[in-house]
Image: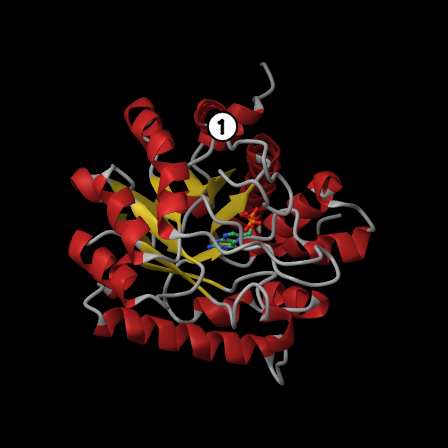
């Protein structure tokens, strides 16, 4: 008998995955994205000169499309295109990212969407805070909007409501230049949860279907090192809001603080954080390193499956087996 490959392990239905998905997001064109079983991997494509870990690498549209398709080939479940860096000001990165006008953001995104949309069926998300950019991206074939400001721009809420598409509402406070000053919490998970609940209410008041929302604790956004760790540890408290969670820990500075590594050398830390989030209900993992994350999740799923099968076969032995 030949040993199962990693791919077999990914494909085989694990007990976790046999349960029906908890959420189904409706995408344009009658497509769907099921969430709540195997965690989905969102591949990051930063079309920026100044992103904290890969700024400038994919600014050329041809290279960006190539990179996006490579991430699709590595097993990404969805792609996130961003044309404005959110790099915070502070000790780790110096001055924060420069704000970008809607015109410049769209100038960066348009040629990529033009070429990428016909080239892949994967859901394409656009990482923007601006209603004008979201509207144009949705018209050009994007499937969902990833808003790190959780609807600060009412025009973005209106564009999403009109399109009926999914939206990611991420927790943050202040702007890139000031967010470090806002990293003050008595109870970080309790306050982030309350502020995400308020974002959900804002979305519903703007006519967005609650069933089309995804929530995100905003790792690294107005959070200091330990606050990020506590938020990850307390993800189930955020899941209690009843919506799927997106977690973006990839290469972020709290990993550098723990490992002493610069952004390009944070793969091990990123994988540890991704698996930790997956085990606590993270439904979408936003990552730079897709192939490695998919591989790590395959092993994790295999372990989960073996543990569940053992527990089902011999409940008494499962606890005491050595
Ligand atoms: N993190 C970044 C950007 N967008 N969106 C969501 N929903 N969640 C996140 O955690 C998140 C996000 C920052 O990472 P990156 O895109 O690599 O860097 P930059 O903003 O500098 O381009």
| Residue designated by label 1 | 60
Quadrant in which the N terminus appears: top right
Foreground residue, 141 or 25? Answer: 141
**Which residue is at 49% across, 57% downward?**
281
Residue 96 appears at what percent x and percent y? 62, 58
**Is residue 24 at all visible to an observer of this figure?**
no
Residue 210 appears at what percent x and percent y? 26, 65
**Residue at the bottom extreme, as displayed:** 186
Foreground residue, 172 or 269? Answer: 172
**Residue at the top extreme, as displayed:** 1
**Which residue is at 46% across, 34% downward?**
76
Quarter residue 189 falls in: bottom right
- Up-down relation of residue 178 to residue 107 (above or below): below
- Up-down relation of residue 146 to residue 43 (above or below): below
Q: Is ligand 1 within 8 Å of the beta carbon of the residue shown at mark 1?
A: no
Residue 289 appears at what percent x and percent y? 60, 36
**Which residue is at 53% across, 31% downward?**
58
């Amino acid at each position: 008998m030949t040993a199962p490959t990693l791919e077999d392990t990914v494909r085989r239905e694990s007990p976790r995955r046999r349960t029906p998905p908890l959420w189904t997001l409706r995408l344009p064109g009658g497509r769907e994205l099921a969430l709540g079983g195997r965690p989905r991997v969102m591949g990051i494509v930063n079309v920026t000169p100044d992103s904290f870990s890969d700024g400038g690498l994919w600014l050329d549209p041809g290279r960006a499309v190539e990179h996006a398709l490579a991430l699709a080939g590595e097993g990404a479940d969805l792609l996130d295109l961003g044309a404005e860096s959110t790099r915070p000001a502070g000790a780790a990165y110096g001055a924060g990212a420069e704000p970008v006008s809607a015109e410049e953001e769209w100038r960066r995104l348009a040629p990529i969407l033009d070429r990428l949309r016909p080239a892949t069926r994967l859901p394409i998300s656009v990482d923007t805070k601006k209603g004008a950019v979201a509207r144009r991206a949705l018209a050009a074939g994007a499937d969902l909007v990833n808003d790190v400001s959780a609807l600060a721009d009412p025009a973005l809420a209106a564009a999403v409501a009109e399109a009926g598409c999914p939206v990611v509402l991420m927790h943050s406070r202040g702007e890139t230049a000031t967010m470090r000053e806002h990293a003050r919490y008595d109870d970080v998970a309790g306050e982030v949860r309350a502020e995400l609940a308020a974002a959900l209410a804002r979305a519903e008041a703007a006519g967005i279907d609650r069933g089309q929302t995804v929530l995100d604790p905003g790792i690294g956004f107005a959070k200091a090192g330990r606050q990020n760790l506590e938020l990850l540890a307390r993800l189930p408290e955020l899941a209690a809001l009843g919506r799927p969670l997106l977690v973006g820990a990839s290469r972020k500075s709290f990993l550098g603080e723990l490992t002493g590594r610069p952004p390009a050398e944070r793969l091990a830390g990123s994988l540890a954080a991704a698996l930790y989030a997956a085990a606590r209900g993270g439904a979408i993992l936003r990552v730079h390193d897709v192939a490695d994350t998919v591989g790590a999740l395959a092993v994790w799923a295999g372990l989960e499956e073996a543990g569940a099968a053992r527990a089902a076969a011999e409940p008494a032995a499962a606890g005491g087996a050595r």
